[in-house]
Image (cartoon, grey):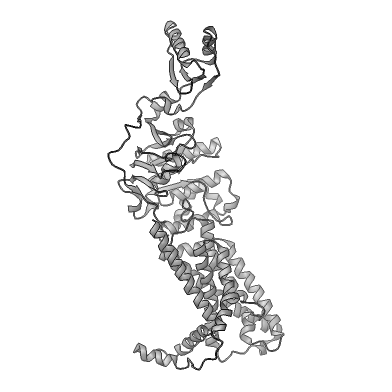
Amino acid sequence: MLQAIGLTSAPRRDGPPAVNDLTFEAPPGRVTALLGAPGSGRTTALRLMLELDAGRGVAYFKGRPLHRIAHPAREVGVLLGDVPGHPSRTVRGQLRMLCAAAGVPAARADEVLEVVGLAGLGDQRLGTLSVGMDRRLGLASALLGDPHTLILDEPADGLSPRENSWLYGLLRAHAAQGGTVLHTTGDPKEAARTADRVITIGGGRLVADQDVADFARTRLRARVAVRTPHAARLAAVVSREARAARRSVEVVEEAGGRLTVYGSNCAEIGDTAYRHGVPVHQLADEIGDTGPAEPAAGGVERDDAAVALSELPPPIRVRPARGPLRPLRYELRRSLGVRTTTMIMAAVLVVSAAMSVLLARTDGTALPRVLAAWPALLPLPPAALGAGLLGALSFGDEFRYPALAAARGTVPRRLGLLLAKLTVTAGFALLLAALTVVGGAQSLRLVYGPDLIDVPSDAFAWGASWAGLTVGCAWAGLLAAGVFRVAGAGIAAVLAVPVLVVPLVQKVFAVPSARSVAGLPGRLRELAGWQLPQQADHWILGVARVVAQPVGTALALSLAALICAYLFTGLRGKARW
C-alpha cells in the first residue's frame, strides 16, 4: 500500500505551491494512474513522495516513509526521466554497476534484461539506444531490487503504440503479483485504458479519486464546448428544448461565459443558438478529462474550506542520497565498464616508453627520470598526469552521469564511497606507475641493449617517491573533482601542484636545512616500543624524503587542503538537510 498524506510543496514566489494538500492511496495489486495536465503538479507530487523536494506531508510505503527503509531499492523502484549513464557503457555493464549499488547479485542484471526484452542487446552502448530501448532500460533499472512498489513518471512518453502496450502489460503483470504501481500521465484515454484506478489532480489539488469504470463514465464523455456572452440564456434554452424533446442533455455553466453541454453536438447547439438569436464565440466538440469544473460521480471533490487541516502536516526534508551498498564493487565496475580507463592507461604507457627512449639519448639524465619518462621541461611525468586524470574522472563522471542519484543530480557523500574511490584510484595509479617503469626498462633494453639498465642503490627510496607521486596525483584529481563537481577541476588541481604550489614551497625551503632524517627509523622504534622490521627502514626513509622534497611537500599540502574542503562541503550539505 502506498499512502500520500497532505503533500504540499514549498511556496513559490509567483503563485501558490505546485502541490497543495494532496492525499491519495495506491493499493497493492492494482495499477494507479496520477492524471493531470502539464503544470498540475504530477511530477512534483512524486518528488515529494520520494523526498527529493522539500515541503510538507508524508508518504508511506507499506507503512514506512522512504528514509526509514533500510534498502530503498528493494522496496521502491523509480523511473523519473531518462536513464543517466555514460554513453560508451554497455547496457549490461550499466545494470551490473547498479546491482552493486543496490546490493543484489550481478546475475540479476541478466534476469531483468530478459524481463524487459533486452536480453540480446546487453552489449549495446547506451549512446546508441533508441527512445524505446532507453525506456526499457530505465524500467530494468527500477526492477533490479525486485521492489514491491513502482513509481514511474510518464513511462510511455515517446513510445510507439506497440511499445506502449508492452510497457503497460508489464506493469499489470507486476501488479498481478501483488505489487503496487503508480504512474503519471497527461492523457485521460491512456489512464482509462491502462489503469485500474485514476487519481485526477488539477492545480496541485485532488480533483477525483475513482475506479477506472467510474472515471471512464463520468470524465471521458463527449461534450460540446460553447463560449457566448449570454451563457445563462443559452443554457436555459438548450435545457428547455431538451426536456421538450425528452432527450438526456446536461448543461454545465462555467466561468468566463463558457458552457459545457453533454448529450448533444455542435450542429444542434448551433441551430438552437441561431433560432433564439444568441451570439456564439466558440463552438467545438471535445473529449477528454473535464478538469475540476465537472464534479465526478463517486469522486472526491474538495473546496478550499474543506481542505483546511487542523494542523500542519509534518515537514518533508530533502534527504541525502544513499551510497552504494557495495561501494568497492560498484567503483570497480564503474571504472572498468568504459573504455576511457584502458585508453588513458594505454596512451600513458606508449608516450612514456617513447619518452624514455628519447631521454636515454641525452647524457646526464638520471636513470630514475629516464624510467619515469620525466623530462625537466614537463611539470609532471605522463604517468602522474594519467593517474590524476583517472582520479578526476572517478568523481567527474559521477556528476556528469549521476547513476547513483539520478533524480538529485548529485553524488552521495558517503565515507564508504569515498574510501572505495580512493582505493581503486590508488590501485590504478600504482599499476600505471609499475607498468611505466617496466615498459620503459624493456624499451631501453630493446633499443640500447641491457648494459644501460643498472639498479640504483636508492631503489627503495626512489620507488617510494614514484609511488607516492602517482597516488598523490590520483587522489588530488579525485578530491578536487569531488569538491568542485567537475572533472576539469580535478585536472587543474593536479597541474596546480607543480605549477603553483611547488614554487611556493621552494621559497619556504630556500634556506639549507641543518638537520637530517637519517635516524628516523630508530627514533620511531623507540617511540613505538616495538621492533620494526629491518626492511622497513628503506621505506620509512623513502617516504620521509618524498615529503621533504618540494614536490612531495606541495602534494601533501594540496591533499590536506582538498580533504578539508571535501569534508567542509559534505558537512555543509548535511546542515542543509
Q: Is residue 107 left or right of residue 360?
A: left
Residue furthest front as drawn = 13
**Residue 515 at x, y = what percent?**
48, 93
| Residue drawn where x is 55% and y is 18% of the image | 281
Residue 441 appears in the rendering: no
| Residue drawn where x is 53% and y is 7% of the image | 275
**Residue 178 at x, y = what percent?**
35, 41
| Residue drawn where x is 47% and y is 91% of the image | 517
Residue 276 appears in the rendering: yes
Q: Quadrant of the N terminus?
A: top left
**Residue 216 at x, y = what percent?**
43, 26
Q: Is residue 111 above or below residue 419?
A: above
Count of labels shown?
A: 0
Q: Is residue 385 above or below residue 372?
A: above
Q: Is residue 460 left or right of residue 57?
A: right
Which image quadrant is residue 338 in? bottom right
Foreground residue, 97 or 256?
256
Q: Is residue 53 above or below residue 543?
A: above
Which image quadrant is residue 379 in? bottom right
**Residue 352 at x, y = what percent?**
65, 76
Q: Is residue 13 above or below residue 359?
A: above
Q: Is residue 133 left or right of residue 70?
A: right
Residue furthest top as drawn = 244
Foreground residue, 437 or 4?
4
Q: Quadrant of the C terminus?
A: bottom left
